[in-house]
Image: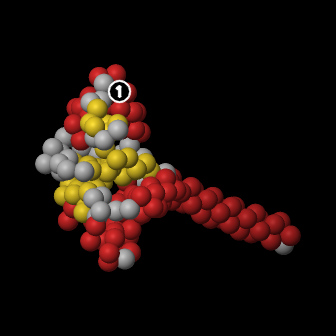
Amino acid sequence: MLWKGGNRVPITKAKKDEIVAGYVEILKNASGFVIISYAGLSTPQINELRAKIREANGQYVVAKNTLLIKALEQCNWPVPTDLLAGPSAIAFGMDNMPTIAKLVLEYVGADAPRGEKITLKGGILGESVFQSNQLDDISKLPTLDELRAQLAGLIIAPAQGIANAIHAATGQLINVIQALEDKNQEGNAA
């Protein structure tokens, strides 16, 4: 519903479809999201949180729950209907969901009055729904880029070990050949 001149005006079907399409587009690029009850926050506080999330390559959206549920269903994401009750804002993490979770936790904990106004409901990471008490664990997970780096390190380590072994064996072979050459030269000189 929209407000116009103090009266509620229903959102048109075309506008609802546009909002759902926007959510779908965000979900295609997201690795997860945190659901926040923001009731009581001032506009400057919401804008501050939105800016922090944007700086971390995330996206903050004040959600229309029923339309977000439709978008989740279209994208085959889990639908946490119990978490999507009442006023909800969504902090989407693109390839950095742990960073977004940590940022939201830090924002809520930064000063007590703000923490009393925000309630973290839970969210989704990949295909799993999580509750608010699990958010701290998620904030400690490595980001997708960190996981890629760790995986690359695991893949490269054996190859590096083989290369080092070949290099060491080659060095030893050269030393043996050099010793034989030196011995031959000593024998020829005598």
Q: Quadrant of the N terminus?
A: top left
Q: How many marks?
A: 1
Image location (x, y in percent) of residue 183: 74, 69
Q: Is residue 79 left or right of residue 143?
A: left
Image location (x, y in percent) of residue 159: 51, 53
Q: Quadrant of residue 154?
A: bottom left
Question: Is residue 107 in view?
Answer: yes
Q: Quadrant of the C terminus?
A: bottom right
- The residue carrying mark 1 is 15
- Element type at mark 1: helix
Residue 73, compared with residue 128, is above or below; it is above
- As shown in the figure, which amino acid type bears the numbered disc 1? Lys
Image location (x, y in percent) of residue 107: 38, 68
Q: As drawn, which residue projects farthest toward the front? A: 5
Residue drawn at (22%, 57%), measured in percent from left and top? 121
Residue drawn at (49%, 57%), measured in percent from left and top? 51
